[in-house]
Amino acid sequence: DIPLQFPMTASLLSAAYALAGRTAEALPLLDQMLERLATGRRMLQHALVITELSEACLLVGRVDEASALAARLLELSHTPTGHGYQAHVCRLLGEVVRRREPPGIDQAATHYRQALALAEELGMRPLQAHCHLGLGTLYGRMGLVQQARADLTAAIALYRVMDMTCWLPQAEAAL
């Protein structure tokens, strides 16, 4: 019942539910937030809200909505304080393109590499790990075994050192 905090809380919670595989609980929050965004009203932590909603959409398989949100985030990231969001949006765009049928493999790799370069520059280690996981998965799909192994190994190492055990099984399975 705190309207000012609802968008951020709902977007984070929908992403957490989606990540935990609790899609039935994620979808109502996600739909409510997408409706709220459609009104065009700005909100606290607007870029963070859109980042989390885009991630949640990807996790529940709503690639087109994730793509539209990533495009909005790209617009928001072109501000003096939006550099970190540029890194996030590049990874999200890589994920979107990788999940399309047919996947845009070269375009996805370019997005991931852009995100990784920005994440390294800004010291965003969790994002670096996610980029390596995305690249490794992409390279594996392309049959580029050595490149896939290098990126997946880097992702696993980063996840372990940061104790981010949620993504370890996915990265290890891909390896």
Image (cartoon, grey):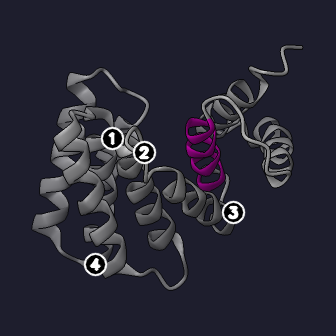
Task: Assign the N terminus to one quadrant of the image.
Answer: top right
Residue picked out by circle 1? 127
CA separation in Å, label 2 and label 1: 11 Å
Residue depth check, mark 2 versus mark 4: number of the one nearer the observer: 2
Q: Earlier in the sequence, mark 4 or mark 3?
A: 3
- Residue of label 3: 65
The residue sitting at 82% across, 54% down in the picture is 38
Magenta region, mostly helix, strand or loop? helix
Lower position in the chain sequence, tag 2 or tag 1:
2
Q: Earlier in the sequence, mark 2 or mark 4?
A: 2
* Three-letter amino acid code at the position of disc 1: Leu
The mark nearer the N terminus, 3 or 2, is: 3
Instruction: Give me the C-alpha separation between circle 3 and circle 2.
Output: 18 Å
Q: Nearer the viewer, residue 55 or 115?
A: 115
Q: Label 3: state its secondary structure.
A: helix
- The magenta stretch is 46-58
Q: Nearer the viewer, mark 2 or mark 1?
A: 2
Cα separation between marks 2 and 4: 28 Å
Q: Disc 2, disc 1: CB below 8 Å? A: no
Residue shown at 84%/48% (left/top)? 31
> Is 40 positioned to the left or the right of 172 in the image?
right
Q: Is residue 136 above or below residue 29?
A: below
* Kind of residue at badge 4: Met
Identify the element where label 4 is drawn: helix
Tag 4 and tag 1, C-beta contact below 8 Å: no
Q: Position of residue 49 (x, y in %)?
A: 63, 38
Q: Closer to the observer: label 4 or label 1? A: 1
Q: Is residue 165 left or right of residue 161?
A: right
Residue 142: mark: 4
Quick one: label 1, few (<14), some, or many (20+) residues within 10 Å? many
Let me know if residue 168 is in the magenta part.
Answer: no
Q: Is residue 55 magenta?
A: yes
